[in-house]
Amino acid sequence: MIVVRACTRGGAVQCPTCGTPTRQVHAFHERVPADVPIDGRRVLIRVRVRRMRCRMQSCARQTFREQVPGVLERYQRRTVRLRDQLRSVVRELAGRASARLLPALGIAAGKDAALRALLGIALPDRSVPRVLGIDDFALRRSRQYATVVIDAETGARIDVLPGRGAGVLADWLRDHPGVDIVCRDGSNTYAQAVCEAGPAMVQVCDRWHLWHGLAEAAAKEVASHSACWAGATGVQDGPLARTTIERWHQVHGLLKQGLGLLECPAPGLMETSNTRRIDCYGGTTEVSG
């Protein structure tokens, strides 16, 4: 570990509440923030700062601790540049993965500190896209849902709305004008919301739901004509086909005798007193005992 000792420069400091400059020193304090590692070793800065006294008697803050702009911030245990490096790592890896990598870089931070650093990153201001993509997702399946709003052209997330009702989306569209095309699924709720917020918006179906709906429709159509497909192919011939037909007759013969499905023996398995006859694909096998 490398320890660097430093102190702040003298001079007037502005009160953070009223902005009045003052040179009156009330006390001295020592801060020990962590800095960017050097050669994989931790670096601590023991810096002595002054606690100043405001000259304005009417000020709500009578004393305050001076800060070092660009180096130290209030209530922080890391320097500004170390905080930026930490945020760059957790932005890519999030909590647990960052906690495994950071010690190798010489930065002491656990998964909780990594998550706090991630939550401290300000979200960028995103403009309202021309083509808007909307869809719902489950926070707790069958209990709590939300609506995600993205830029359909770039895939960037714009906002996450609580709930998936028509009113939630309609209010958001009214507050964020400028959308020309809305890409959505087949939900009538979202269609109603878009019509209420802006009838001039063009509504299109997104590619995934379009292909998913087409696949479901094709599967239903094929299933409805399954009997036709079976008749068109004709009766199969061969050992496997003969074994299948024999098993079918065995099961239905037992059902006609009044036996239920649970009472019927396994298809293809006939037991006698001394010999078990097992029908196999392509022939039979007799096992004594």
Image (spheres, rainbow, N blue to C red):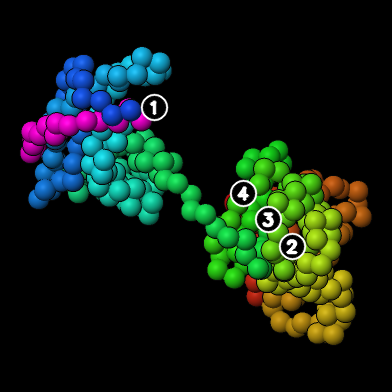
- What's the distance in space between the residues labelled 2 and 3, CA to CA? 21 Å
Q: Amino acid at mark 4?
A: Val
Q: Amino acid at mark 3?
A: His
Which one is earlier in the sequence, the residue at label 2 or at label 3? Answer: 3
Camera-near label (2 vs 3) is 3
**Image location of residue 269, percent across then percent down:** 70, 58
Q: Is residue 239 left or right of residue 233?
A: left
Magenta range is 1-19
Q: Which residue is mark 4?
A: 160
Q: Which mark is residue 176?
A: 3
Which residue is at 55% across, 68% downward? 154
Label 3 environment density (alpha carbons within 10 Å; few <14, some 14–19, many ≥20): few
- Residue placed at 45% from the left, 46% from the top? 122
Q: CA distance from mark 2 to mark 4?
A: 17 Å
Q: Nearer the viewer, residue 148 or 72?
A: 72
- At 81% across and 85% down in the image, what residue appears? 233
Q: Position of residue 74 (x, y in %)?
A: 31, 31
Disc 2 is placed on an element classified as: loop
What is the C-alpha distance between the residues marked 1 and 4? 38 Å
Q: Which one is closest to the eye, mark 3 or mark 1?
A: 1
Label 4 element class: strand
> Label 1 is placed on what type of residue?
Cys
Which residue occupies the foreground of this view, 124 or 28?
28
Residue 78 image-quadrant placement:
top left
Number of the front mark, 1 or 4: 1
Q: Earlier in the sequence, mark 1 or mark 4?
A: 1
